[in-house]
């Protein structure tokens, strides 16, 4: 757990940034429901992390001190989406989306 948090701080990511919307459609739906500003900030953090990774660098120490890798922004909405899907399944309705991962 410490290593994951350390890597997130060094590259400026939050733990919720590591969820992949292409792998889990519930994550994609949760991201669609979030405000635009939060999604834009997530995309900016991901771009910055990719840029730093390609350069084999870390954030400067003063920026690392400001990072908040354990502040969740996606968990509540993701739990809501999963509850809605479970309710739909319990009522016998068809899922909103079906896709198999190749």
Image: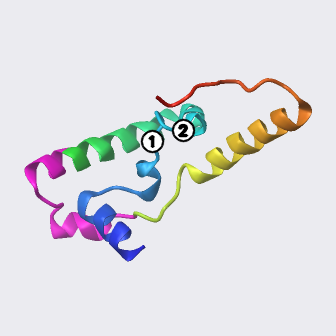
Identify the element where label 1 is drawn: loop
For label 1, the residue is 20
As drawn, the residue found furthest toward the left would be 55
| Mark 1 burial class by Cα count in 10 Å: few <14, some 14-19, many 20+ | few
Quadrant of residue 5 within the rendered picture: bottom left
As drawn, the residue found furthest toward the front would be 102
In terms of depth relative to the viewer, which is nearer, 84 or 38? 84
Say whether residue 93 is magenta.
no
The label on residue 92 is: none
Quadrant of residue 10 within the rendered picture: bottom left
In terms of depth relative to the viewer, which is nearer, 62 or 59? 59
Marks 2/1 in contact by CB < 8 Å: the verdict is yes
User: Measured from the top left, where is residue 40 in percent x and y?
Assistant: 39, 37
For label 2, the residue is 24
Report the predominant secondary structure element of the magenta stretch. Answer: helix
Quadrant of residue 44 within the rendered picture: top left
> Which residues, given as a range, are shown in magenta?
51-68
Residue at 36% x, 67% y: name it. 4
Residue at 46% x, 42% y: name it. 38
Q: Is residue 37 left or right of residue 31?
A: left
User: Measured from the top left, where is residue 34 in percent x and y?
Assistant: 56, 38
Q: Is residue 100 left or right of residue 79?
A: left
Residue at 88% x, 38% y: name it. 90
Q: CA distance from mark 2 to mark 1?
A: 6 Å
Residue at 59% x, 38% y: name it. 30
Image height of 65 relative to 71, above or below: below
Q: Is residue 2 left or right of residue 49?
A: right
């Amino acid at each position: 757990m410490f290593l994951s948090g350390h890597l997130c701080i060094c590259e400026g990511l939050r733990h919720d940034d590591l969820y992949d919307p292409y792998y889990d459609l519930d994550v994609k739906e949760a991201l669609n429901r979030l405000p635009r500003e939060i999604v834009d900030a997530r995309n900016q953090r991901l771009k910055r992390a990719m840029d730093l990774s390609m350069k084999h660098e870390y954030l400067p120490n003063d920026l690392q001190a400001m990072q908040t890798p354990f502040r969740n922004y996606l968990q509540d909405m993701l739990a809501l989406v999963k509850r809605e899907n479970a309710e739909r399944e319990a009522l016998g309705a068809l899922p909103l989306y079906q896709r198999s991962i190749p």
